[in-house]
Structure formats: structure tokens, C-alpha cells
Image (cartoon, rainbow, N blue to C red):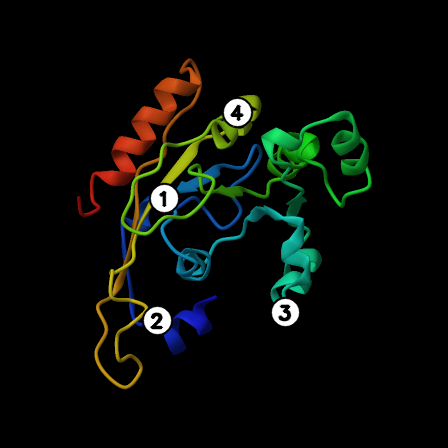
Amino acid sequence: GMLVTLLFVGPVVINGIENLPALEPGKPAPVYIANHASQIDVAVVYYLKRRWRWIAKSSTMFLPGVGQIMYLGDHVLIDRIPKKKKSSDDASSSKTSSTGARNLYKKSDQSIQDGVPMFFFPQGTRRLGERLPFKDGAYKVAKNNDSTLIPVSIHIPLNAWNSSYPFGKADPVVLTVHKPIVTKDKDIETLKKESSDIIYSVLPD
């Protein structure tokens, strides 16, 4: 991820690095959450130099290189089933998938209890320049395990895809690591609002 960023995206600046958990965070491990605006996000966050597992669509397995890394890294792969197609037939077919959506929480909980953090983009999908609402998944996992949340703001310059880098100067990608959020005695809606406000507080309107 760091090599791809260096070769094709540009420099990365990290603020709040003192807020990062230790390399071995203990048990239960924390849950990282970040805004999701671009495919670049997945690469640049490796500049934090921490270990975690992703949740990704099982179709990621078919991406050359990336799929093999996801498999060997024991990341959580799920099948997304469109709401309008959630029938008994769909439920039956999902049983043959690598990891059905119903196992998302089980696999995530196991990782956290083993001391390996999970990394979520709570928006669930990416949209450059638009603030999508945060979904519940990351917060359910954190609450299930009494994990702390580590909010990360990712600012990707809007010209990142059409700059002259590496032949010219590029605006830096900026990662901001915020102070951990304790999840105990807070409901999911409160955590969603608190973390969303924190993450977007340092991003452009």
C-alpha cells in the first residue's frame, strides 16, 4: 500500500500519530474507523504502520495480487446480497460463499478477541466529495467486544487522480488520527454521531 501511494499518488502527512494504539494493542483489540472517499484510502492508511483486518466483498479474491493478499492475510470476505434479491434461494446460495454476511460479526469478533484490530469504513462505500451517513456495522463490533474506536480522517486531494505526479508536485494526502473513543455505556447512534463529527471536523466542507 505504501509503495503504490509513493509511486502513483504522492506524499502522505500524518497528524495525531501519538493517538495510535501500540503495535500489539492487547485484547480486545480496537476498531479503526475512517471516512471513505476513494480507492486510494485502502493504500494510504498503511502509512499508519499498524496491523488490522479488512472486511471486503468476496469478489476481491479475483483481483490479481490483491485477492491473494486478502486471502493470505485472513481478512473477512463476505457476499453482498441486494435487498430486493433476499429470498430463500439467495439465502441458500450464500451458504456456499467464502464467508456469508451473517458471519461478518462472528469473524470480526474473533479477530478482535485474538488481539488483531478490524478496520471499517462505516459509510460502506466510497464517494469522493460527498459525506455519506455512517452505518452500524463497525459500532456493533466495537460494542460487542467493549473495544475502543480509533477515528481516522483521510483527506484525499480532489486532484489526486489527475495531477502530474510523479513528474510534478502533488498535494499531500493527510491522515489525522484522533483520540480513541470509549464505547462502553454509549449507544450506537451516539457513537455514530460522535465519531462522524470528529472525523469530518478536520476535512474540507
What distance separates the C-alpha of mark 1 from that of mark 4? Answer: 17 Å
Left-right relation of 130 to 113: left
Quadrant housing the C terminus: top left
Residue in the foreground of this view, choosing between 166 and 159? 159
What distance separates the C-alpha of mark 2 from that of mark 3? Answer: 19 Å
Q: Which residue is mark 2?
A: 9
Which mark is first along the chain, 2 or 4?
Answer: 2
What distance separates the C-alpha of mark 1 from that of mark 2? Answer: 18 Å
Q: Which residue is mark 4?
A: 140
Position in image of residue 75 (x %, y %): 64, 49
* Residue that protrudes farthest toward the bottom in the picture: 167
Label 1, secondary structure: give it. Answer: loop
Please say if 107 is above or below 57: above
Position in image of residue 70 (x %, y %): 64, 57
* Residue that protrudes farthest toward the front in the picture: 84
Image quadrant of residue 164? bottom left
Which amino acid, by three-letter code, is at mark 3? Gly
Circles 4 and 2: CB distance less than 8 Å?
A: no
Label 2, secondary structure: give it. Answer: loop
Q: Residues within 10 Å of mark 4 (few under 14, many from 20)?
A: some
Q: Which residue is mark 1?
A: 35
Please say if 27 is above or below 130: above
Q: Which residue is mark 3?
A: 65
Circles 1 and 4: CB distance less than 8 Å?
A: no
Which amino acid, by three-letter code, is at mark 2? Val
Which amino acid, by three-letter code, is at mark 1? Asn
Mark 4 or 3, which is nearer the eye? 3
